[in-house]
Amino acid sequence: MKFVDEATVRVNGGRGGNGSASFLREKYIEKGGPDGGDGGRGGSVYLVGDSGINTLADFRVARKFSAEDGKPGARREMTGRSGEDIFIRVPVGTIISDTESGEIIGDITRQDQRLLVASGGESGIGNVHFKSSVNRAPRQFTPGKPGEARKLLMELKLLADVGLLGMPNAGKSTLIRAMSGARPKVASYPFTTLHPSLGVVQIESDRSFVMADIPGLIEGAAEGAGLGIRFLKHLQRTRLLLHLVDVWPMDESIDPVAEVTAIASELTRFSEELASRPRWLVLNKMDLGPEDEQDKRCEDIVKRLDWQGEVFRISAISGKGTKELAKIIMSALEEIIRQEKEDGESGGVDLSEYDLD
């Protein structure tokens, strides 16, 4: 299985500035010679690693990046100004390849790592360089060369910032459909999700996070039962867990409180570190019950769970409350990341001791 965020962009190095064909013209100086200066070099394009960026969503909009051209040379052997380099920040873990040749240009593996992806063009030279004993008044100069132009494919292996927990049919696949561009299979029977779906939830052009719909983590998962245990490697970077609950299960004998307790127990048995992450209770399928009973139903669940954390009410299938929830999640993640940077923590979960292949 492959869980990859992809984006294609065009990058262009700046053109080198032209050389100058100029001759010295000064009062009291007879027969002034050539004094044309060289052009400036074109700017280059670099990619820079940024651990604060989680997805390539920004590159769905900005698809072309061009560095500044170099300026032409001038009289008195003045060299033109070089073009400004541009630095494009990308997530750590991004692999960059050339779409035409298929060549892998590089892999951004650490914070602030720089990778040159398009060199600026060389500058032209002025006529002062062509002066010789037999050519005292050269008019030759060379133009600047064009910068390197490439079409790049950027690939990022997705690791979830937000993990969705819940019994089969709790509505996890429906929620990820409502909040992102992912299109997992949705049906009215358990274990619809045989593979984890990862979706990029974009709040604004420069604010997004990755949400993972993990296959049902059921009782006995810590011993290998069910499907979810096989895919917990996608939760290594998880900073927040959403625990989805079907408030109005079709089978009236099912107790939502018992389901939440069972999953919480399995999560702790599997990884105490993962279980220590912030976990929000999301009461789903609110639209299936009578309006006059909704408050009582939700309050009963929260009270019996003795839930002390955040609680949200949504209807994933209609989208009610999902946009508001996405914005709150984004703000919470940004605060968590800010705090991690202050504390010098990585924010990841160590699952290396488990065989998750």
Image: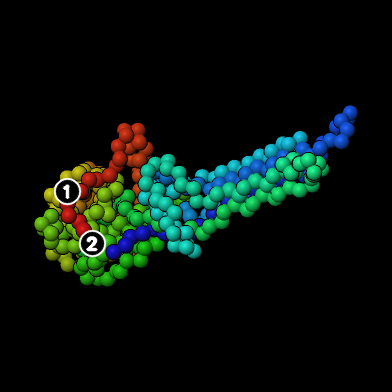
Q: Position of residue 257 (x, y in %)?
A: 16, 54
Q: Which residue does the image show at 53% across and 48% down from the upper left?
A: 45
From this viewpoint, which residue is outermost toward the front?
Answer: 134
Q: Mark 2 = which residue? A: 215
Q: Position of residue 284 (x, y in %)?
A: 28, 58
From this viewpoint, which residue is outermost toward the top?
Answer: 28
- Where disc 2 sits, the SS reads loop
Q: Position of residue 302 (x, y in %)?
A: 21, 49
Where does the C terminus fall, quadrant-wise?
A: bottom left
Observer-nearest residue: 273 or 298?
A: 273
Amino acid type for the residue under numbered disc 1: Glu
Where does the N terminus fall, quadrant-wise?
A: bottom left
Mark 2 or 1, nearer chain start: 2
Above or below residue 218? Residue 54 is above
Above or below residue 259? Residue 40 is above
Alpha carbon distance from label 2 to label 1: 21 Å
Observer-nearest residue: 6 or 275?
A: 6
Amino acid type for the residue under numbered disc 2: Pro
| 10 Å crowding of disc 1: few (<14), some (14-19), many (20+) | few
Task: State yes or no: discs 2 and 1 in contact (Cβ < 8 Å).
Answer: no
- Where disc 1 sits, the SS reads loop
Q: Which residue does the image show at 66% across and 39% down from the upper left?
A: 81
Q: Mark 1 = which residue? A: 353
| 10 Å crowding of disc 2: few (<14), some (14-19), many (20+) | many
